[in-house]
Every structure is written in structure tokens, then in C-alpha cells.
């Protein structure tokens, strides 16, 4: 059995050079208007945002009374997808429902 002894020794540096940051989060907001029905807003909150009927009703009333309501907080890509889904469903049903996102 031969023993191999190299002239140098390798050192492995296992430190991470870059810090991993949490992704930025975005609030998805619904805006009140005079034409979109309350029932449709609840339907959107149930189907797009997976809210319970109670939470959907509370959020819908907040939008109705205060002019704006938070549907949820998501990463950029998820928030963007939800905003697009709301606009597509609203257009399909001919409602002018406005949905936006802003950084949390």
C-alpha cells in the first residue's frame, strides 16, 4: 500500500459571500367604484385570494366603506398574477374593478 503525500494542501472556504435577502412583499389592493357589485367583489376574494366567506365579506365592506382594502400580501410575481386575474375576471363580467399592488 503506497501513501501519497502531496506537496500542498487544499483548503475549502465554505463561507457565503452574499447574504440572501428575503423577497420584497407586495400588498394587493382592491379599490371601490360605483359600478362593481358587492357580490362580485366577494366572489373575487373567494376565488382569487382564497378567503373564507367571512373574511371576504369583511374585506368587501372595508373596500366599500373606506374606498380601498387589502386582499393579501405576496411576493412580486404572485401579487402581479393575482392583480392580472382580478382584471381579467372583472373585464369578463364588464365591471371596472381596479386592483393594484404596492410594496409592503
Image (cartoon, helix red, strand yellow):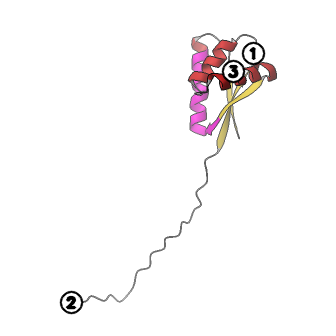
Give coordinates of residue 95: x percent, y percent: 65, 12
Please tell me which residue is depicted at 63% across the width and 22% down the height of the picture.
Answer: 53
Q: Earlier in the sequence, mark 2 or mark 1?
A: 2
Q: Nearer the viewer, residue 76 or 62?
A: 62
User: Does residue 64 appear left or right of residue 85 in this picture?
Assistant: right
Kindly identify which residue carries mark 2.
Answer: 2
Kindly identify which residue carries mark 1.
Answer: 33
Q: Which mark is residue 57?
A: 3
* Neighbourhood count class around disc 1 (C-alpha, 10 Å): few under 14, some 14–19, many 20 upward: some
Residue at mark 2 to residue at mark 1: CA–CA distance: 84 Å
Q: Secondary structure at mark 1?
A: loop
Residue at mark 3 to residue at mark 1: CA–CA distance: 16 Å
In this rendering, the count of numbered labels is 3
Instruction: Give, as a single range, the part of the protein colored magenta.
Output: 73-90
Please tell me which residue is depicted at 56% across the width and 66% down the height of the picture.
Answer: 17
- Would you say residue 59 sits in the magenta stretch? no
Please tell me which residue is depicted at 62% across the width and 38% down the height of the picture.
Answer: 74
Up-down relation of residue 80 to residue 91 (above or below)? below
> What secondary structure prevails in the magenta region?
helix
User: Does residue 103 appear left or right of residue 4 in this picture?
Assistant: right
User: In this view, which residue lies farthest toward the left?
Assistant: 1
Give coordinates of residue 84: x percent, y percent: 58, 26
Give coordinates of residue 48: x percent, y percent: 57, 25
User: Does residue 82 appear left or right of residue 61 in this picture?
Assistant: left
Amino acid at each position: 500500500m503506497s501513501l501519497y503525500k502531496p506537496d500542498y494542501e487544499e483548503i475549502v472556504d465554505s463561507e457565503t459571500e452574499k447574504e440572501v435577502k428575503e423577497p420584497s412583499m407586495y400588498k394587493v389592493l382592491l379599490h371601490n367604484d360605483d359600478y362593481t357589485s358587492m357580490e362580485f367583489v366577494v366572489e373575487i376574494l373567494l376565488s382569487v385570494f382564497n378567503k373564507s366567506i367571512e373574511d371576504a365579506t369583511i374585506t368587501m365592506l372595508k373596500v366599500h366603506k373606506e374606498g380601498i382594502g387589502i386582499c393579501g400580501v405576496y411576493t412580486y410575481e404572485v401579487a402581479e398574477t393575482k392583480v392580472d386575474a382580478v382584471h381579467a375576471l372583472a373585464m369578463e363580467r364588464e365591471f371596472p374593478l381596479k386592483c393594484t399592488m404596492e410594496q409592503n
